[in-house]
Amino acid sequence: MGAEDIGALIYDLFMWPLERGWGRKWRARLWEGISGRVLEIGVGTGANIPYYPTDAEVVAVDVGTGMLARAGRKAAGFQRRVELVRADVRSLPFTDGTFDYVVGSFLFCSVKDPIPALREVGRVLVAGGEVRLLEHVRPRDGKLAKLLDLLAPHFAKRTWELFPEAGLDIVREEELDSRGLVRLYWLRKSSERKREWKASRTAR
Ligand SMILES: C[S@@+](CC[C@H](N)C(=O)[O-])C[C@H]1O[C@@H](n2cnc3c(N)ncnc32)[C@H](O)[C@@H]1O
């Protein structure tokens, strides 16, 4: 077992209590209503694989070979068809407008250069497509936010501030816990939202 495989095993052990508890509900919500051509970014060890809708055609990427190996075993165990590709989300090996949905969970706390990564996400999305992200972010609860700033700053990022800069608009946001630490985002390309807005103005 190499260092990458050990890292992936440790990740699963660390996440196990969460996955047995709230994780199930959060991940089921993340994948609700998704179908067609789907790209999962930062698939990790495949924690989302059991929640893939059966009619979705999923391609999943990650930079970690140990993570991808575990994800492959999970896909086989759950009998889910997924194409696993080693790729960096900042430079995706897909042509423009390939996917109906791009989905990710707990990724943008760890991606270096998140803005170029989010721009890549927008590039591979079809016109009218949707980005769905489950993220832990800076909580609404001020005391908790300050505590995280001291102890675990990567848990308290203002990830939502990145979206407009990368050309993505928040269509909907849902807090999945009482302190606003874990949130689900529905995003679309800003250019499309502007076009829709202009069309609704001229129709008046
Ligand atoms: C915190 S883990 C989350 C894994 C999984 N999405 C989950 O919900 O359990 C972050 C994952 O993102 C991957 N990752 C980080 N930066 C990446 C990048 N630039 N491109 C692709 N994957 C990346 C890491 O290898 C890791 O597997």
Image (tube, rainbow, N blue to C red):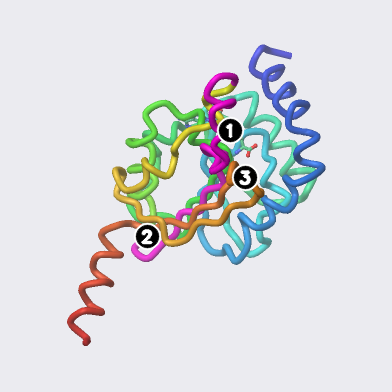
Q: In which quarter of the image is residue 194?
A: bottom left
Asked if residue 169 is positioned above or below residue 121 in the image, the reply reads below
**Residue type (three-letter) at the residue carrying disc 2:** Val
Crowd class of label 2 (few under 14; some 14 to 19; many from 20; radius 10 Å): some
Look at the image and tell me whether residue 37 can be seen: yes
Q: Position of residue 38 (x, y in %)?
A: 52, 55
Crowd class of label 1 (few under 14; some 14 to 19; many from 20; radius 10 Å): few
Where disc 2 sits, the SS reads: strand
Kindly report the distance in space between the C-alpha atoms of the residues bearing marks 2 and 1.
41 Å
Tag nearer the camera, 3 or 1: 1
The numbered mark at residue 179 is 3
Asked if residue 103 is positioned above or below residue 73 in the image, the reply reads below
Kindly report the distance in space between the C-alpha atoms of the residues bearing marks 3 and 1.
10 Å
The numbered mark at residue 126 is 2
Tag nearer the camera, 2 or 3: 3
Left or right: residue 52 versus residue 106 is right
The residue positioned farthest toward the front in the image shown: 143
Does residue 138 belong to the magenta stretch? Answer: yes
Q: In which quarter of the image is residue 148?
A: top right
- Which residue sits at x=76%, y=41%? 19
Does residue 28 belong to the magenta stretch? Answer: no
Choose the circle earlier in sequence order: 2 or 3: 2
